[in-house]
Image (tube, rainbow, N blue to C red):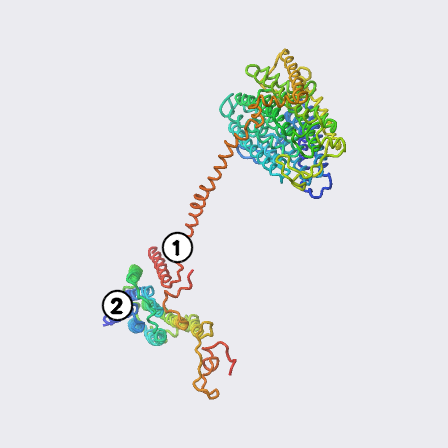
Amino acid sequence: MSTFVFFVAAIGAITGAIGVIALKNPYYSVLALVGHMISLAALFLLLRAEFLAASQVIIYAGAVIVLYVFVVSYVGDSAPTFGQEPSRLAALGAFACGAALVVELFIAVLGSGLQAISHDGAPYHAGFGTPGAIGTLLLTRFLAPFEIASYLLLVAAIGAVTLARRRRGLDEGIEERTPALEIGDVFLPRPASTGTMAEAGGSRGMSEP
Amino acid sequence: MSATAAAWIVLAAPLAGTIINGALFRRLPGRSAGWIGTGAVAVSFIFALITLAKIQSVAPGARELTSTLWTIAGTTGVDARATILVDPLSVLMICVVAGVSTLIHLYSVSYLAGDRGYSRFFAYLNFFVFSMLLLVLAGNFLLLIVGWAFVGAASYMLISFWYRRTTATSAGIKAFVINVLGDVGLVLGTFFIFKHTGTFDLLASFHRAPHVFTSGSGDVTAGCLLLLVGAFAKSAQIPLHTWLPDAMEGPTPVSALIHAATMVTAGVYLIARMHPLFQLAPAAGDVGAVVGCLTLLIAGTIGLAATDLKRVIAYSTMSQIGYMIMGVSIGAYTAGLFHLMTHAFFKALLFMAAGSLISAMGGVQSLDRMSGFRRALPFTFACFIVGGLALSGVPPFSGYFSKDSILLFAAGRGGWHWALWAAGYVGALLTALYTFRMIFRAFLGEPCAEALELIETGHLHHPEAPTNPANGEIEDTDVGFPGPDHAVAERAIPMRAAMGILALLSIVGGIVAIPHVTSWLDRFLAPTFADSTLVGNASNGVLALGLILGAVVSIGGIAAAYYIWVARPQLAGQLRERFAPLATLFENKWYFDELIDTLVVRPGAWFGRFSQNTFERVFVNGLLVGGSTGLVRASSALVRATQSGILRVYAALMLLGAAAVALYFLLQS
Amino acid sequence: MSIGWYLAVSAIVFAIGAGGVLVRRNPVVILLCLELMLNAANLALIGFSRMWGNGDGQVFALVVIVVAACEVTVGLGLIVAIHRRRLPIDVDELRELQG
């Protein structure tokens, strides 16, 4: 039974991977990646890593893919500028590189101690792969990596915001803000340096009301 | 104080004079540079006399002293030391060089007064004296070559002393280039000798030479011939003589010192010093004798036709050195050196007097414009007469005995040397002719305008605008050109003193070696030349014949000169027309300049142009330089391509690199 | 199934991801391929963790997921910024860092 599930999941993972690199529309690539990730979660489950499988689905297939979908929506409309897709030669070259890599990795994996990996793994004891076990490890042996990973997340968040904000640059095409209605200052759109757009928009801070 | 210590001081004094004059040249007031220079060389002369005294106090067999100051480079097979050799030959040379140099320095103190380059002149002159003394005192081949080269450099600096005159600078270059040719000969000759003797030390070389060379072998003959090339270049013998007449562009004291008394005698000294080697290479000795003989005849004939006062004296120098070269080549060492000594006296005297005469003429050197200075410049006239008589070899002046002893030796050797003997007397006739042609034309006859001005008003003639006597260009009297003052002997005590001493020496100098009567010089030089195998003992009959013939030829020559140029003035013109082809040959200096121009100068210039246009432009610049830069550019373009900025290329390279590393570790395990 | 099978799948997926990085020109798709490679590494890690029987590999894989999330955040931020400046979204065109 587990063999059958393994093959299904493996084929799903490989198919998803091929789909990512072969499909022209980036939306479809993202979808293929989703499939791949879910197959991978199944493989994790087969390896008794239940917490990892769950976090793979929630974090990876959940949040990261959503990010991708957003960006592909924002950006992906400029499809015509993509120019020509990989030429035959480039594709062939990439295929050759990939093939060489696979061969090498196979040699590395299978050529070395076959007996070491030819079994199903160590005897299973209860609690392996449960959230509790992972949590214990995170807070005892791997406390430092855990903390550093948190910092990394913080830095990445700040970095992303900084990168993507709208700056008042020289080349920026700032669209004229035409007022919808001129009754006093009521219906004017608020200037970019105020309100909740302050941190994402202009760089002058709270200088105007 | 030992003889060698005194010899070191002889070397050090002029060097000190150079350094002082050279370092302080802007600050020395008035004539102090002149007195410092003269004083330095005078100190050198005093110590030369002390060396002479000291070396006579040593036993005759032990009079070859060496002294080493330090080792320059001592490795296997090469012994380079700063060694001087003090033996009778070098002591004679330093006494002559230092003594005559002192007198010439004294003369220059007033002769060059007013010249903007006064201190520079004395610095150069002292440097020259130092170099000449170094050459003469050198105890090994290396110091000899160093001294030789320094002397050439000093000659160049002094010939082009008035450096804004293009004629002077060209003359300096010409002299230097021909001297360098001689230097090459000297160095190659040294190599040939060194190859077999294995040492640079002179005495050691001479002791080993008979054991390592067989008489007449190829290497020793080649070495001596190359040494002769050096001697010929330095002593202005055919065919390397063309620089000497042009060297008269330098100031007259320079001509007196370098091109009469000292530098041009370096070749004679070289052959005398290397006599053990020359005796192993008789062919080289014969070549030297023949070249010396040819030179004395050819130079004599050109002297007959020359019209520039200093050039007449220059050709006379060339001719007399031909006698000396001939003498030392056939083995008459003492006689040749005797003639060197007496020649230094009377030739320096003649040049000094010529300087005085040129001053009176306001810088003009052409004989055609000079006449009748007898009453205007009596002292100068007397000096000219004394020098001329000594040069012509009239008894009992010094030149008579010295010239005669060389020819006597030639007769004593016999065989084909009788031809040299005969040529020597023909040369003596020519000498008397051209010398007194010069004297009579300048001093007898109607006074020319400059002489009249001097007699009547007592003022020296100054031209309105200073001109270059060679090509008539107008110049000024600032630095780089002669100064505005002209000094004549009658009015300058230093000049008179120097000339007077030299005149005295010209008259009585012959007493040191009157053949078969006195032999002071023979006995003095005997320790050096004791190993000489060439003997020229002539019988008393030949001696008497020689003495009488010498007197007859010289006095007859003077009389003929008087007849042609004074008694019957038109005769000169008629003779010239009768022998027009000969006269043209003599006037064009036997076309040696043109010959060298065609054979050497033009091919050299062509080769230079070819090298630049074809070889350098195409091969070196295009192929080598361009090729290597092109190679570098191409390879850097290749490397630059990896920094294309294309992300995927970077990714590919990274993957490949990682895969390669993994493969490496895989293969290891 | 022995662990070797999982490692084989991981190798194949990794190679596919590497090939995709080399071939595709859209930076978003390149980031997707990078995700593939990271997932393949995760699979290998978890496989080894199962082999040895301790949870170190799983913790490592968790941290890898975190790092991947950060990297995606920043990378997509970059792409948004590029798009804002009206530059072409094509890695072959974005080559000002050339030398």
Q: Report in which chain the residue with disc 2 lies.
A: C
Q: Is mark 2 on a helix, strand or loop?
A: loop
Q: Which amino acid does label 2 sit on?
A: Met
Observer-nearest of B294 and B541: B294
Helix, strand or loop under label 1: helix
Q: Is residue B126 above or below residue B627?
A: above
Residue B565: mark in rendering:
none
Say which of marks 1 and 2 sits in front: 1
- Mark sitting on residue C1: 2
Q: Is residue A80 above or below residue B92?
A: below
Same subunit: marks 1 and 2:
no
In the rendered image, the vertical position of residue B213 relative to residue B152, given as above or below: above
Image coordinates for residue B417, horizontal then vertical, percent: 56, 17
Residue under numbered circle 1: B638
Work out which quarter of the rendered image holds the N terminus of chain A and state it.
bottom left
- Residue B244 lies in what quarter of the image? top right
**Alpha-carbon span between mark 1 and mark 2:** 50 Å
State the residue lying farthest toward the right: B457
Crowd tier of the residue under label 1, counting other residues whose Cα lies within 10 Å: few below 14, some 14–19, many 20 or above = few
Can you give x and y, in whole percent of width and height, for residue B264 in the image? 61, 29
Residue A24: image location, x then y, percent? 29, 70
With B400 as the anchor, is B186 left or right in this view? left
**Residue B256 or B537: which is nearer the viewer?**
B256
Q: Can residue A59 be seen in this view?
A: yes
Q: Residue at x 33, y 55 (%)?
A: B667
Query: Which amino acid does the dot numbered 1 rest on?
Result: Leu
Residue C49 visible somewhere in the drawing: no
Badge count: 2
Residue at the farthest bottom position: A183
Q: Is B397 displayed left or right of B319 in the figure? A: right
Q: Position of residue C80 (x, y in %)?
A: 39, 73
Q: Residues within 10 Å of mark 2 (few under 14, many from 20)?
A: some
